């Protein structure tokens, strides 16, 4: 997560209970369904009337409208400009995505999240006013590549391009050893955050705790140091 993203997420209002989603493709539908299941009110729009009808029938939104989001008048009449946060999920139609984002920005929508389908698309969205751009295909590709090359890493949270928090399967070389014996900080420059035992994690484990083969541990540190682990 870069500093600009951190600033964006800190600016979101916790009391906001309503979101608008423009575009009901796979990505937009996933956003709608998740927000709806979490108890938030969602207004969705799409230029395709069939997608709108499907979203309503599947009850993944509170309201859904068929409209052309490149028309500022249509967005205004639908009340989209009144939302605190709007997600532009039109990833495969670059022109429509950019015009829609520009319409929202010029109308003064405080928080605009937009989906990009390429790096050029991402740059253009940023230039016309998107506050936060997501690149799901790129991110999914990175996750898959890491999973294929480092299958022992179960979860990864990137703090920045150089540092991460990772959950990994305890290496065979670590089995039966205590955290103190491993000397992770001295040998690898890493800090242990948690260790699993019988399906539960112990946070900030004691140095005397022994690691077990097949369990998991969570460490934080530089990516180069993480890659030096025997995984």
Image: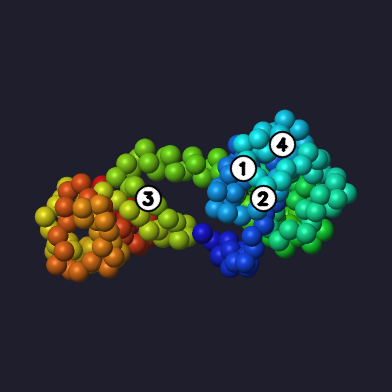
Is the residue 162 above or below the residue 141 in the image? below
Spatial CA distance of label 1 from label 4 is 11 Å
Q: Which residue is mark 4?
A: 52
Element carrying mark 4: helix
Spatial CA distance of label 3 from label 4 is 35 Å
Residue 38: x percent and y percent? 54, 53
In the image, which is nearer the foreground, mark 3 or mark 4?
Answer: 4
Q: Which quadrant would residue 177 be assigned to in this image?
A: bottom left
Q: Which residue is mark 1?
A: 60
Q: In the rendered structure, which disc, 2 or 3, sits on the residue that comes first in sequence? A: 2
In the image, which is nearer the foreground, mark 2 or mark 3?
Answer: 2
Q: Which residue is mark 3?
A: 155
Is the residue 126 above or below the residue 181 in the image? above
Q: Residues within 10 Å of mark 3 (few under 14, many from 20)?
A: few
Left/right placement of residue 185 relative to residue 15 reads left
In the image, which is nearer the foreground, mark 1 or mark 3?
Answer: 1
């Amino acid at each position: 997560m870069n500093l600009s993203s951190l600033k964006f997420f800190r600016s979101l209002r916790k009391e906001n209970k309503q979101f608008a989603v423009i575009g009901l493709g796979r990505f937009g539908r996933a956003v709608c369904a998740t927000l709806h299941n979490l108890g938030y009110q969602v207004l969705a729009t799409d230029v395709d009337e069939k997608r709108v009808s499907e979203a309503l029938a599947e009850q993944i939104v509170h309201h859904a409208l068929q409209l052309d989001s490149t028309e500022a008048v249509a967005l205004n009449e639908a009340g989209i400009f009144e939302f605190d946060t709007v997600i532009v999920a039109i990833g495969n139609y670059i022109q429509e995505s950019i015009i829609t984002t520009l319409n929202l920005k010029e109308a003064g929508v405080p928080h605009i999240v937009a989906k990009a389908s390429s790096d050029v698309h991402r740059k253009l969205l940023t230039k016309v006013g998107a506050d936060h751009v997501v690149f799901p295909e790129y991110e999914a590709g990175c996750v898959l590549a890491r999973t294929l090359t480092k299958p022992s890493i179960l979860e990864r949270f990137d703090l920045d391009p150089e540092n991460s928090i990772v959950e990994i399967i305890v290496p065979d070389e670590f089995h039966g050893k205590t955290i103190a014996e491993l000397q992770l900080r001295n040998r690898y420059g890493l800090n242990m955050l948690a260790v699993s035992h019988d399906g539960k994690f112990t946070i900030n484990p004691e140095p005397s705790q022994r690691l077990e083969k097949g369990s998991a541990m969570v460490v934080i540190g530089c990516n180069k140091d993480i890659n030096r682990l025997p995984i």
